[in-house]
Image (cartoon, helix red, strand yellow):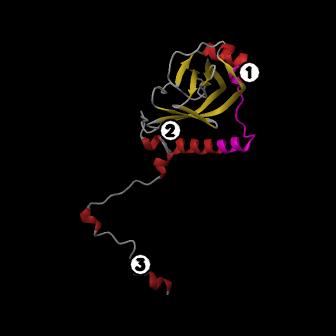
Amino acid sequence: MKAETTSNIERTINSWLVCLGSEARLDGFAITVDHVSSDLRGVREDDALLIVKEGSSGSEVLAFSRVYRVRRALDKTTLLLDGLLPLDPARSFGDLGILSPVATAAVSRLEWPVFEAALKTACGIEFPRLPVLEGKTPQEQAYIRDLLQSAVVDDLLGPAYGPVEEIIGMSVRDRYLVGKLAPPITQFPDDQVEDLPDATTADPEGDDREA
């Protein structure tokens, strides 16, 4: 699926199969995936997720969702969602025309036509109409506040793409505004430190001014 960005450059939206279990966990409106068997470098903002879990009678589809922001750490990746449409009750793969996945990874690529057809069958809507979290419940309100805080920290302080982010074509201070606002750390040679005034020493003229 193609999506138009703010720069009028089309980007392909991919769909992914997320299998909840020991390596992938859904906590509220965020999915945390351990870096064990999944390669999440391809997951991007606005991508579609089909969330499934292994049940007693096979794999079951729990929800459809959309990625708002990807937060990467050294040992895990967190997918923050801005849309989550749960199925109640859960639906089997067969009901939605999905073949059981062969891959054992917690996150694997899912062909877009398969995702689109499953969403249409289960919910009767297309992906652009997936409901956005609007803060209708206290849980959503708290989550949206956390999203705003995370977005501000990522955009102003960084690193927005995790500890291994590479900044190309500009300096870190140009990429992150806080790098320009914060004064550089000034270090003096040891032989000059003794000549600097002691900040704890009282101002010799202070008493005269107060008088």
| CB-based contact (under 8 Å), mark 3 and mark 1 | no
Which SS class for mark 3? loop
| CB-based contact (under 8 Å), mark 1 and mark 2 | no
> Depth check: 68 or 31 in front?
31
Residue 171 position within the rendered picture, expressed as x and y whole percent measured from the top left: 41, 40
Q: Amino acid at mark 2?
A: Ala
Whole-angstrom CA distance, mark 3 to mark 2, is 45 Å
For residue 203, the mark is 3
Q: Amino acid at mark 3?
A: Asp
Whole-angstrom CA distance, mark 3 to mark 1, is 74 Å
Residue 31 position within the rendered picture, expressed as x and y whole percent measured from the top left: 58, 33
Which SS class for mark 1? helix
The quadrant in which residue 67 appears is top right
Q: Nearer the viewer, mark 3 or mark 1?
A: 1
For residue 160, the mark is 2
Q: Amino acid at mark 1?
A: Cys
Callout 3 crowding tier (Cα within 10 Å): few <14, some 14–19, many ≥20: few
Which SS class for mark 2? loop
For residue 123, the mark is 1
Looking at this view, name the residue that lies furthest to the front.
Answer: 56
Q: Nearer the viewer, mark 3 or mark 2?
A: 2
Callout 2 crowding tier (Cα within 10 Å): few <14, some 14–19, many ≥20: many
Whether 140 is drawn above or below 126: the answer is below
Q: Is residue 142 magenta?
A: yes
> Left or right: where does residue 190 sit relative to residue 159?
left
Whole-angstrom CA distance, mark 1 to mark 2, is 34 Å
Q: Residue at x 71, y 19 (%)?
A: 126
Which corner quadrant holds the N terminus? Answer: top right
> Left or right: where does residue 33 sit relative to residue 97?
left
Residue 175 position within the rendered picture, expressed as x and y whole percent measured from the top left: 47, 40
